Image: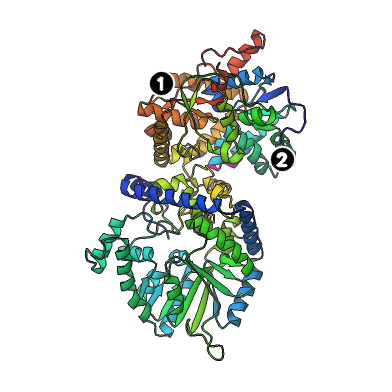
């Protein structure tokens, strides 16, 4: 297990790895993450030139492509020594756990990968484990349930943090989700290549969501969120998916 | 062991079969609960799993030495051990032996490795009779079906299916199939005669103990005990990776196996067999006169020392199948191989090559549930990824994924181009989007919109908004509109 932020002094400033999906599809999630961080006295920079962490290529087996993207992302993130916050469990997992393996044969980059990994945190992990915050002062309405996206959950051990943060949001009713830790069937290209299996897994997830009686599903990964939201919309459901940062930003 | 239908057709068939999916969903859910309850009852399950992993790593790390020791011990106790480099050698050994001893009829207890080498087919082709004595395997044999789970071969069948099989194939009456106890009793009556007349018993091996040459065979029905002791000749087939250095190691592994596979503290019948029956002074009254152990390699030794070596730690508990959301939806047959589920998606291409099995490593969302439950902590997702990389290098898989990712990478390492491409795509998608979503994507992406809407891209990216914000003075994003 990696040590959490090594210094006892809490970081006052971080870099945001915004991720390609948030940048192009869900900018409001990125903005919300910034809002929450700033509210707690943490200033945010967004390193220029960031594109995609390479996870889609890595998961598809195209490691040469993934390597190129990993090198690029590492170059972008190592211009600065501040901790890195990622509002996506799977991208954080990619940077934290796979860059070093992928670049093992290139000592200079392996070193960069190690260094970057040692200061990379998923968003809720950063708030709870590094800043020590569970009450963000957020308020909301309605019934909220939480889907534990796989890579954050099993790759990073992110589960108690988002739950603790949600617990302190005033005005919402929390609903338990059956099989909250079972995959929604996204898995990147899996949803396209193995569309039928993915569709069957999604259907099971949507059934559980409907059963929970929630009107909002909270996720820590917009990719799973995009998948679940798309499925809900196809069903004509009124349930919405929101990223944790968006829930925490509202008051 | 390849299946005639392509993977996606097998999946389609499985997904279309509601009864199958219902049966598998219920059975796996029960097993998942059983496992959790059994592990909760252990003082320190995590430590036990670490210990189990260490034992397996140690055994496999010195496999040649362990196997040599095992063979010496088997022979010292009067058994015969033979090495079978591939399936052909393994089945031929048995058929030749049966012929040489004039055996006509064989009883068999459940074993995955004999499924792998298609032993029954070879036995029947040689004009001999073989009867599966595990209840599930017996049904499979009567149905000319294949097991769909490595621990529970008929997890895909309902009680009604089995009743119908008994009536159709072996003349059961309504009373014989009235309930589960009568069905079991019926099968028992049928099988008893076979046990008594068989000239040879065939079994698998859960663990082979190097220090003593002992075979450990776990069953829940007691048929394993009869198979290995009643007939005059016992032939045990053992994957070479099933070795454990010492009896003390076995103590640990048995605890993990039973809890992870069925939620039991210990499998009901855990047999330890060392050599054939001893005549003479310390005479034993039961057991076979001859014991043969066939050590099956069949591709395993190529896996040793590779990035997939860890899959050989597997103790075939089946926990990863039960936990896997893909397996739960499609069941075992869709995988097309003897070993289904997460472990099969690695093991099958590892020993059989990717040419026939390049789809299997992709039949996973990489959710990690398999790694979470594996009693010896095998990192299956890591190996699925390694196999995908291998498949990509060997040129398996659809061209569009290759070309698409190549192009994506080309832009992703050129930020200006990436932004421009992003904007152009956003423009294009805004033309087809309605209410911010797209209901039909073209080409290979159509798979997505078969089951879900796709979001339109944002009119202004995060980075554009971020830049604007900095120019404004750099503070305070309004959360309005979130
Ligand atoms: S891989 Fe692990 S969980 Fe799966 S069958 Fe083997 S030992 Fe059990």
Q: Residues within 10 Å of mark 1 (few under 14, many from 20)?
A: some
Between B185 and B95, the one nearer to me in the picture: B185
Give the secondary structure at mark 1. Answer: loop
Residue shown at 61%/58% (left/top)? Answer: B52
Q: Residues within 10 Å of mark 2 (few under 14, many from 20)?
A: some
Name the main secondary structure of what is drawn in magenta. helix
Could one spot residue A140 in this view of the protein? Answer: yes
CA–CA distance in space, label 2 to label 1: 42 Å
Q: Residue B440 in the image: x percent, y percent?
A: 38, 28
Mark 2 belongs to chain: A
Q: Residue B380 in the image: x percent, y percent?
A: 55, 50
Give the secondary structure at mark 2. Answer: helix
**What span is in magenta?**
A60-64
User: Which residue extends farthest left?
Assistant: B174
Residue B465: quarter of image: top right
Same chain under badges 2 and 1? The reply is: no
Left or right placement of residue B90 versus residue A235 in this view: right
Asked if B22 appears above or below B145 in the picture, the reply is: above
Asked if B215 appears above or below B362 in the picture, the reply is: below
Between A209 and B359, the one nearer to me in the picture: A209
Residue B98: quarter of image: bottom left
Is the distance from the Cβ of mark 1 to the nearest ligand 1 atom less than 8 Å?
Answer: no
Mark 1 belongs to chain: B
Question: Label 1, on which residue?
Answer: B433
Question: Label 2, on which residue?
Answer: A110
Could one spot residue B127 in this view of the protein? Answer: no
Residue shown at 65%/42% (left/top)? Answer: A102
């Amino acid at each position: 297990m990696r040590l959490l932020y090594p210094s006892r002094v809490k970081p006052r400033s971080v870099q945001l790895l915004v991720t390609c999906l948030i940048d192009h599809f869900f900018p409001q999630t990125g903005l919300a993450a910034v809002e929450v961080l700033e509210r707690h006295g943490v200033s945010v920079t967004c390193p220029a030139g960031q594109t995609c962490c390479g996870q889609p290529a890595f998961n598809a087996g195209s490691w040469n492509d993934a390597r190129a993207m990993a090198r690029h992302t590492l170059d972008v993130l190592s211009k600065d020594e501040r901790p890195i916050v990622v509002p996506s469990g799977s991208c954080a997992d990619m940077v934290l756990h796979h860059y070093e393996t992928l670049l093992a044969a290139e000592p200079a980059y392996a070193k960069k990968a190690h260094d970057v990994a040692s200061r990379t945190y998923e968003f809720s992990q950063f708030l709870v484990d590094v800043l020590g915050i569970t009450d963000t002062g957020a308020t909301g309405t309605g019934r909220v349930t939480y889907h534990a996206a796989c890579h954050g959950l099993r790759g990073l051990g992110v589960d108690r943090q988002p739950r603790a943060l949600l617990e302190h949001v005033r005005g919402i009713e929390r609903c338990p989700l059956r099989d909250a830790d079972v995959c929604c069937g996204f898995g990147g290209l899996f949803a396209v290549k193995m569309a039928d299996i993915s569709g069957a897994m999604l259907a099971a997830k949507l059934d559980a969501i409907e059963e929970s009686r929630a009107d909002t599903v909270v996720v820590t990964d917009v990719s799973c969120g995009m998948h679940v939201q798309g499925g809900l919309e196809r069903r004509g459901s009124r349930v919405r998916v929101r990223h944790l940062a968006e829930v925490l930003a509202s008051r | 062991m390849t299946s005639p239908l392509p993977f996606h057709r097998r999946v389609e068939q499985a997904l279309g079969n509601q009864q199958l999916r219902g049966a598998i969903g219920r059975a796996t859910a029960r097993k998942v609960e059983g496992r959790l309850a059994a592990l909760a009852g252990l003082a320190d399950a995590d430590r036990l799993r670490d210990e189990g992993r260490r034992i397996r790593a140690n055994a496999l790390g010195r496999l040649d030495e362990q196997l040599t020791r095992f063979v010496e011990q088997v022979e010292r106790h009067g058994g015969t051990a033979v090495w079978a480099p591939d399936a052909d050698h393994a089945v031929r050994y048995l058929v030749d032996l049966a012929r040489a001893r004039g055996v006509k009829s064989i009883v068999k207890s459940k074993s995955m490795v004999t499924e792998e080498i298609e032993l029954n087919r070879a036995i029947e082709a040689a004009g001999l009779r073989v009867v599966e004595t595990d209840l599930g395997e017996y049904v499979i044999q009567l149905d000319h079906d294949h097991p769909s789970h490595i621990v529970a071969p008929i997890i895909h069948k309902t009680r009604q299916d089995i009743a119908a099989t008994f009536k159709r194939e072996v003349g059961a009456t309504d009373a014989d199939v009235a309930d589960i106890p009568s069905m079991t009793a019926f099968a028992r009556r049928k099988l008893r005669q076979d046990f008594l007349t068989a000239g040879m018993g065939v079994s698998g091996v859960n663990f082979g103990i190097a220090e003593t040459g002992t075979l450990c065979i776990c069953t829940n029905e007691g048929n394993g005990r009869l198979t290995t002791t009643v007939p005059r000749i016992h032939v045990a087939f053992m994957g070479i990776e099933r070795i454990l250095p010492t009896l003390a190691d076995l103590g640990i592994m048995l605890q993990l196996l039973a809890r992870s596979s069925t939620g039991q503290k210990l499998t009901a019948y855990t047999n330890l067999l060392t050599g054939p029956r001893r005549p003479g002074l310390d005479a034993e009254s039961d057991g076979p006169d001859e014991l043969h152990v066939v050590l099956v390699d069949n591709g395993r030794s190529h896996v040793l020392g590779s990035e997939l070596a860890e899959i050989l730690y597997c103790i075939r508990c089946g926990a990863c199948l039960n936990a896997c959301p893909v397996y739960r939806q499609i069941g075992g047959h869709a995988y097309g191989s003897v070993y289904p589920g997460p472990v099969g998606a690695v093991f099958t291409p590892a020993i059989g090559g990717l040419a026939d099995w390049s789809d299997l490593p992709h039949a996973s969302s990489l959710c990690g549930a398999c790694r979470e439950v594996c009693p010896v902590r095998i990192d299956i997702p890591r190996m699925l990824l390694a196999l995908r990389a291998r498949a990509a290098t060997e040129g398996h898989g659809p061209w569009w994924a290759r070309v698409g990712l190549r192009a994506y990478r080309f832009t992703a390492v050129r930020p200006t181009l990436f932004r421009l491409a992003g904007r152009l795509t956003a423009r294009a998608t805004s033309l087809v989007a309605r209410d911010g979503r797209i209901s039909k994507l073209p080409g290979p992406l159509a798979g997505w919109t078969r089951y879900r809407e796709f979001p339109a891209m944002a009119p202004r990216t995060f980075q554009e908004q971020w830049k604007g914000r900095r120019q404004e003075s750099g503070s305070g994003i309004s959360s309005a509109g979130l």
